[in-house]
Amino acid sequence: MKLNQYFQSYQEYFWQWETDTDFADKSEFTENNLITIPNVGTISYFPYIIEVLKALQPQGLPPFGSLLLVIYATQEGPLNLDGIFYYLNRLKSRKEISELIEPALCFLEMLSTLNNNLKKKQNKVILLQTVFKNCHNAISAKKAEILIEQYNQNPKVTLECSKKIILTDSVLNKDIGTLSLLHKKYPNATTLINDIKGWNKEPEVEFTEPIISSKSDTDFIQELIKNQETFEVGSLIKRIQSGIKIPMYHPLLGEYPTGDIADISNKGEMHRIILSEFANENEMFISRIANNEVLYIEREIPPEENNPQRILLLDVSLKNWGTPKILGFATAIAIIKHPKSTIHSSAVILNNNSISTAFENITDVIQGLNEVSPLLESSASLKKYFKNEYKKDQEIIFVTCQESIENTELQNTIYSNRDKIKYLITTSFSGELNIFKHYKNSRKHLQKIIFPLQELWEPSHISNIKNNESVELPSDYPILLPLPDNWINTFYLDGLYYALTSKRQLVIIDHVTKNIFSGYKTLYSQISIKLKGDFELVKNLNGEHVLYQFQNKKALLSKINLDTKIYSELDLSNNKWFTPDIHLMCLNGQLYLHDERFTVVYNLSIEGNLKINKVNECRKIEKEYNNGENQYIGPNIPGVKLVTNISTIGITNKEKLTINKFELNLTDTNFLSLNYRTKDPLISKAQQFHNTYTFADGSSIVHDKYGILIFKSMDINIPQFYIPCVLFKDLAIATDLTFSGNKYYLPEIHQLEVINIKKMYSEYIQTFIKHIIQYDAAS
């Protein structure tokens, strides 16, 4: 096997090459020095991989993908095995290896449960040697020796290997098949430990039975997860720790006392000239001085004591409330409590008066989450901190939300203190975390982490309303959802209509009859995009939906695979042909960047990496575009007016349900609608907590942010039912078995019994209201 074949990376596989410019090893070549799992975390720096390969060489080398998976599964710190499993489970569509994946996953999960003592220093080397001893698909010891020698002679081979090629079944058979066979060899941790004990080399420590995880680093995090008030923060911490690229230790800052030839230079003061120079004749001595050839000696400088303090400044101003604050606090705790951190770290909450905390217990976290600033942005608090509390030995990390960072005053404050703020971390409502590093006068983007918040905070993890949490919402409604009138973009693809909403959802219109559109079903939620610019939706060869975005003002082209969550972007600001008139369009299934006059047209690659190619037939494309313009711009799908913020839900003296200043009524023509209410007084009013409104009898109404009201009555004869929260339109009522009202909300394919709206209004809504009134009267 050739060297570049062994280290080759592949498209849509679980690992890739990356470069960490902050990491420096002994070699002169520092590109592609890091191996990572996209959107999951770091596997290892490459110099460590080379050391492992050298240790394994006498017995032969396993397939590279197998080795990377085992190295990741045997890390000491927090793991994100779900991320690995996500990539491997996607491969089940390949028939030849589908049966190999489950045993391989079981083997990795078993390795992750091993005692941390087995994963340290020489013990880990013995562990890897044991696992891969006489494994299948291994390279012989002689060939392994040749490969390592080739790498020593050509460390730049990783440049070529970083260019991804198509993933083949033969590669997967080697990588996944090897782990599958190892699972048969080591079905549990006991068999592996017994095999390790049989080695001639005894491990450095005693072996004990495997445990699920090391409690020393996880107790506090588990407490956060179990507590209802801190669950959301706790659920993010391990994911952040497994993937964040901020260094967790520091070398000495001062100069090392090297001595010997390292202290000799050809620059210096006259009294520093070394004595041997004076042995030269006068002419030679003067000539050497004139030509800067004379040698000087520098005295040794002892290293400075390095006790840095890492301070995380947490912005709690108005725009940081809610999800951004949760992300910010989770990031701070993840850094402070990182198991490999050797830096003393603490957090400072930037309220009117700065509040310092090290997050030592749950009380600290809860009190911190309750801290809020009424100011729109935190520039004043930030200035105050740098003026009164900042010290030179502090490494500052400023954590704020993306919306706040767009504020001019805050930007100026950050710029003025750029020499003090080493890292800037921004959060967002969509679950996106961006990490920047200030270096000299520039800001470098280090990393983007996207969290699947809907999955992490799904209702199965959340208690009911009595435990002070948002109520559980159905994952799938029996009726279609109403499309809001503030959608961002619409698409027509393969005969189907799609819309991108302001909630960062991609939805599909259920059916269209004679240009009459129905409601929608959600395809993708929490899409990590800016809601600005041009959008186009396409499908790749695998049938996956890919969303392209072009932000003209930033000259930024990006794409995100909505199925795999893989994101990439391309900065066009340095291209000479770029103008402010460039737009993104889709024509005949192809994507183009063009200006209004079609003087510049570039074609975008739909498959593979994000790249553009110049098109010569500009006039032909212009003609096609103008002839079918309406087809490509997308349909004009009508939206509806949703009630997004509910402050009051009550019942009037005429037994009508009211929502804010609107009243739910069945008209004489049998249309159910929400219209402006009369001045009838309220006789019963629901108590609000989060998205739930509860009446005195225990009956409740849950308001889903996507436009549905969920009615839960304490009358056991009334099943749970649903009504769209839409103004001035004909509405519908549905249970899990029945439907009545506007067919806009009725799925094209359904098993619901369609009944009369008047009957449903009487049996469900009126009965719901009467039960509440009778309870109030009785009490």
Image (spheres, rainbow, N blue to C red):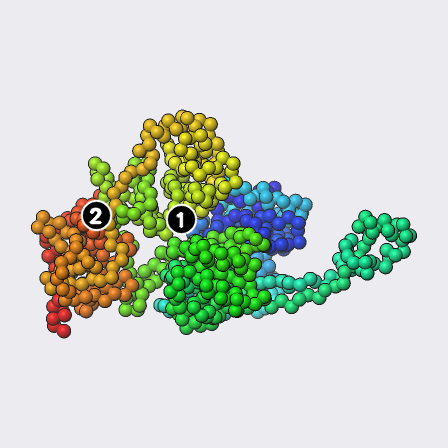
Kind of residue sitting beneath label 2: Tyr
Task: Name the residue rendered at 43%, 71% in the picture.
Answer: 364
Closer to us: 91 or 578: 578
Q: Position of residue 166 (x, y in %)?
A: 49, 40
The crowding category of the residue bearing disc 1, from other C-alpha atoms within 10 Å (few below 14, some 14 to 19, many at least 20), is: some
Q: Is residue 346 above or below residue 173?
A: below
Closer to us: 188 or 411: 411
Q: Is residue 614 visible?
A: yes
Residue 508 as seen in the image, left or right of residue 336:
left
Residue position for label 2? 745
CB-based contact (under 8 Å), mark 1 and mark 2: no
Camera-side mark, 1 or 2: 1
Residue position for label 1? 529
Q: Mark 1: which secondary structure?
A: loop
Task: Name the residue rendered at 46%, 42% in the picture.
Answer: 555
Task: Name the residue rendered at 34%, 62% in the picture.
Answer: 461
Task: Name the residue rendered at 80%, 60% in the picture.
Answer: 272
Closer to us: 275 or 46: 275
Can you say which quadrant of the picture contains the C terminus?
bottom left
Q: Position of residue 525 (x, y in %)?
A: 35, 51
Q: Is residue 240 visible?
A: no
Please, which residue is most extreme toward the left here? 668
Label 1, label 2: how far apart the Cα atoms are:
28 Å
Q: Position of residue 229 (x, y in %)?
A: 36, 68
Q: How many callouts does the rendering have?
A: 2
